[in-house]
């Protein structure tokens, strides 16, 4: 694609980065913060200006639009591209000042608003792939918001390219921009049937070439220990301290294995992350993660067993456990739609990149959408150091992501019968 596409996607990204679109998990409104609507509304205007006549925002803040088909073939499936506009509540998104470090050559990138914040090649091996590229960072006190405004900029730029190049054959292409992904609510009101796509791709991944079609399966587990409280001066033989039972339980949890701090790759884990309570009642909350849903059951049975063991050793103590499903490995759905992955690999190769497959040690909106009936793998957007003051993205990776989107639209068209 032409050099002007580079500047177009970079220009858009730099513009979007300045909007404060932080979401807020404590909010009970939808979207969680009104400020996300400012960017979402401006995106409607911009999509209309580049020629997507039906671009509109709904009452929940979802922006949807269509690139009309150019193919003469009657049955090319509709595909979609999705990105989220919100940024993480973990770090401020106000006053983001993006800085373009031209022609990166391995030098330390010192971020001027806090000179202690330095992006170093030694700590960021992925920067080795960026020699000669233009690396964008924030200024040292905020996140950058490449997660996921890089994805937003790539989709808008690809849509503008397709509209301006009707000679590129493709089927109907749907676009959606969503709020509140970072707080796990990005799909809460997503209308899959209105979106109307056979499959979709979230543009929300890392290094160029990445295609992610697998995520964790995840449950949340709550273990509640009940003791018995009475005046400690007259408690002999009567008081049962739920905190001590909980401490015994936590001591029994796997530590050198099956923990976030000791696992990587395809290994799952159990992770106690909240401990609260007192003598009468103490609650331990745990995250359960595994790539196999059956593996969740095994881990939950183990947790249940350890909790009962701890309680049984203190007469008078009781325990109960509850499990709530969080999300499931999207591979279970995507295995039934192999063309969605195969076409993504082909598009990455046509963009001159090597395909990298990766399993997400977490969930994405795509994990949820896949189970809502819209198979949705995740493609690279060029994001690095998510939710950090050292977040960065390169202009050239964003340009490659635009290429991949355009190729993907072509590949789906070519694969359809005439
Ligand atoms: Zn994201």
Image (cartoon, grey):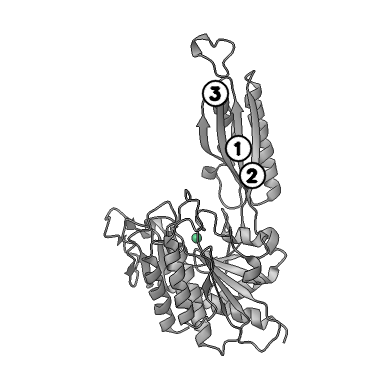
Q: Earlier in the sequence, mark 2 or mark 1?
A: 1
Determine contact: label 2, label 1, CB under 8 Å.
yes
Q: Where does residue 183 sit, x and y in percent of width and height? A: 51, 53
Residue at the (38%, 61%) spot, across then down = 20
Q: Secondary structure at mark 3?
A: helix
Q: Quadrant of residue 143?
A: bottom left
- Is residue 210 visible in the rendered image? The answer is no
Q: Dot 1, crowdedness within 10 Å: few (<14), some or many (≥20)?
A: some
Q: Quadrant of residue 224?
A: top right
Q: Nearer the viewer, residue 227 or 262?
A: 227
Q: Secondary structure at mark 1?
A: strand
Q: Earlier in the sequence, mark 3 or mark 1?
A: 1
Q: Quadrant of the C terminus?
A: bottom right
Q: Where does residue 230 sit, x and y in percent of width and height? A: 54, 15
Q: Nearer the viewer, residue 404 or 245?
A: 245
Residue at the (58%, 55%) spot, across then down = 363
Q: Earlier in the sequence, mark 2 or mark 3?
A: 3
Mark 3 Cβ and ligand 1 under 8 Å apart = no
**Which label belongs to residue 324?**
2
Residue at the (32%, 69%) spot, across then down = 101
- Mark closer to the observer (2, 3): 2
Q: Is residue 361 above or below residue 309?
A: below
**Which label belongs to residue 244?**
3
Q: CA distance from mark 2 to mark 1?
A: 8 Å
Q: Where does residue 144 sit, x and y in percent of width and height? A: 39, 61
Q: Nearer the viewer, residue 347 or 234?
A: 234
Q: Which residue is mark 1?
A: 222
Q: Is residue 47 above or below residue 239?
A: below
Q: Where does residue 94 sit, x and y in percent of width and height? A: 35, 58
Q: Is residue 321 above or below residue 2?
A: above
Q: Dot 3, crowdedness within 10 Å: few (<14), some or many (≥20)?
A: some
């Amino acid at each position: 694609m032409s050099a002007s596409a580079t500047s177009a996607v970079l220009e858009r990204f730099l513009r979007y980065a300045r909007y404060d679109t932080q979401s807020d998990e404590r909010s009970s409104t939808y979207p969680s913060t009104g400020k996300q609507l400012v960017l979402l509304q401006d995106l409607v205007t911009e999509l209309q200006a580049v020629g997507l006549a039906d671009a509109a925002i709904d009452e929940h803040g979802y922006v949807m639009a269509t690139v009309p088909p150019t193919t003469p073939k009657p049955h090319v499936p509709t595909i979609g591209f999705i990105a989220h506009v919100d940024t993480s509540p973990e770090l401020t998104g106000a006053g983001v000042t993006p800085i373009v470090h031209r022609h990166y050559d391995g030098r330390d990138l010192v971020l001027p608003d806090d000179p202690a914040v330095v992006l170093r090649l030694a700590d960021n091996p992925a920067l080795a792939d960026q020699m000669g590229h233009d690396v964008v960072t924030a200024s040292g006190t905020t996140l950058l918001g490449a997660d996921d405004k890089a994805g937003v900029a790539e989709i808008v730029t690809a849509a503008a390219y397709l509209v301006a190049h009707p000679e590129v054959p493709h089927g109907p292409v749907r676009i959606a921009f969503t709020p509140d992904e970072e707080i796990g609510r990005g799909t809460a009101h997503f209308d899959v049937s209105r979106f109307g796509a056979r499959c979709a791709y979230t543009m929300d991944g890392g290094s160029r070439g990445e295609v992610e079609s697998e995520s964790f399966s995840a449950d949340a587990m709550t273990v509640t220990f009940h003791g018995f409280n009475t005046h400690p001066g007259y408690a002999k033989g009567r008081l049962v301290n739920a905190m001590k039972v909980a401490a015994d339980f936590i001591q029994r949890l796997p530590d050198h294995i099956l923990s976030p701090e000791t696992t990587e790759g395809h290994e799952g884990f159990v992770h106690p992350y909240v401990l609260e309570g007192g003598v009468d009642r103490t609650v331990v909350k745990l995250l359960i993660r595994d790539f196999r849903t059956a593996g969740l059951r095994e881990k939950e049975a183990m947790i249940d067993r350890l909790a009962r063991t701890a309680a049984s050793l203190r007469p008078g103590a009781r325990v109960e456990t509850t499990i709530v499903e969080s999300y499931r490995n999207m591979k279970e759905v995507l295995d039934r739609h192999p063309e969605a992955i195969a076409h993504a690999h082909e598009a990455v190769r046509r963009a001159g990149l090597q395909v990298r497959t990766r399993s997400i040690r977490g969930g994405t909106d795509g994990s949820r959408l896949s189970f809502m009936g819209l198979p949705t793998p995740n493609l690279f957007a060029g994001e690095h150091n998510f939710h950090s003051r050292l977040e960065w993205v390169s202009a050239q990776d964003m340009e490659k992501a635009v290429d991949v989107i355009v190729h993907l639209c072509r590949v789906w068209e070519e694969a359809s019968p005439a």
